[in-house]
């Protein structure tokens, strides 16, 4: 059906063009008649007016369509020997692949540890800056300018913080022990005084 005829059917359904010629053409042409029926059914469904006409029992139609489908048989394997060889190669190569993965992971771990050791090295070299004679000819005294490494001072601050934290933790544990000893002594004194009353 052409697009023009489809538009004509749609306009007739919407009552834009209603004349006897178009109705006669719709009645005589089965394709246009079926389109007319579908358009009206769509409109009824959208308005919620005609839900009893819709039949959603599709299982018989699907079963008939499946029965009409041609049967496709799976082809046999061309060569059983080829599939056996492929299976043997995979079985042979699998342990090597696993070893390669393990070796890669171990290599990455070693490289990471070495990189970490270089980054956290405590014995960083002291940088010395020697001032030479300036170009102007005036001699300045040669001196050693020591510039403390900020990374070393950060590590020292972290160590000091950890030392203080451990001291606080130790003091707290001692306080808990002392308070539990005091509670036990108080309970024992109260028990000792009860029979005397």
Image (cartoon, grey):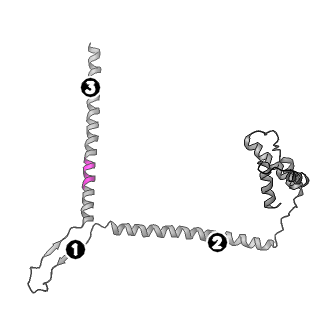
**Magenta region, residue range:** 160-167
| Residue 84, position as x, y percentages in the image | 76, 71
Name the residue at 26% across, 40% down. 174
Splitting the image into 4 quarters, where does residue 56 fall?
Answer: top right
Name the residue at 14% across, 86% down. 135
Earlier in the chain: of badge 3 and badge 1, it is: 1
Q: Is residue 162 magenta?
A: yes
Q: Main secondary structure of the magenta part?
A: helix
* Residue that label 3 marks: 186
Q: Is residue 140 magenta?
A: no
Camera-side residue of 103 and 1:
1
Task: Name the disc covering residue 93, or none.
Answer: 2
Outermost residue toward the top? 197
| Residue 126, position as x, y percentages in the image | 22, 72
What whole-number distance in Å separates the C-alpha atoms at marks 2 and 3?
75 Å
What whole-number distance in Å separates the C-alpha atoms at marks 3 and 1?
63 Å
| Residue 10, position as x, y percentages in the image | 78, 52
Outermost residue toward the right? 28
Camera-side residue of 175 and 40:
40
Name the residue at 58% across, 67% down. 98
| Residue 65, position as x, y percentages in the image | 86, 54
Q: Residues within 10 Å of mark 2 (few under 14, many from 20)?
A: few
* Residue that label 1 marks: 127
């Amino acid at each position: 059906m052409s697009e023009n005829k489809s538009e004509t059917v749609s306009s007739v359904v919407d009552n834009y063009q209603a004349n006897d010629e178009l109705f006669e053409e719709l009645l005589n042409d089965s394709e246009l008649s079926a389109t007319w029926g579908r358009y009206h059914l769509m409109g009824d469904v959208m308005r919620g007016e005609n839900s009893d006409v819709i039949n959603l029992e599709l299982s018989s139609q699907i079963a008939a369509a499946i029965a009409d489908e041609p049967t496709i048989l799976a082809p046999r394997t061309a060569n059983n020997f080829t599939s056996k060889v492929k299976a043997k190669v995979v079985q042979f190569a699998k342990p090597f692949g696993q070893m390669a993965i393990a070796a890669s992971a171990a290599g990455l771990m070693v490289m990471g540890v070495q990189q970490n050791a270089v980054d956290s090295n405590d014995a960083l070299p002291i940088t010395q800056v020697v001032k030479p004679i300036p170009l102007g000819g005036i001699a300045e005294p040669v001196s050693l300018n020591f510039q403390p490494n900020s990374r070393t001072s950060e590590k020292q601050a972290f160590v000091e913080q950890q030392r203080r934290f451990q001291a606080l933790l130790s003091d707290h544990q001692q306080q808990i022990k002392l308070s539990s000893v005091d509670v036990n002594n108080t309970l024992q004194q109260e028990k000792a005084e009860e029979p005397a009353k």
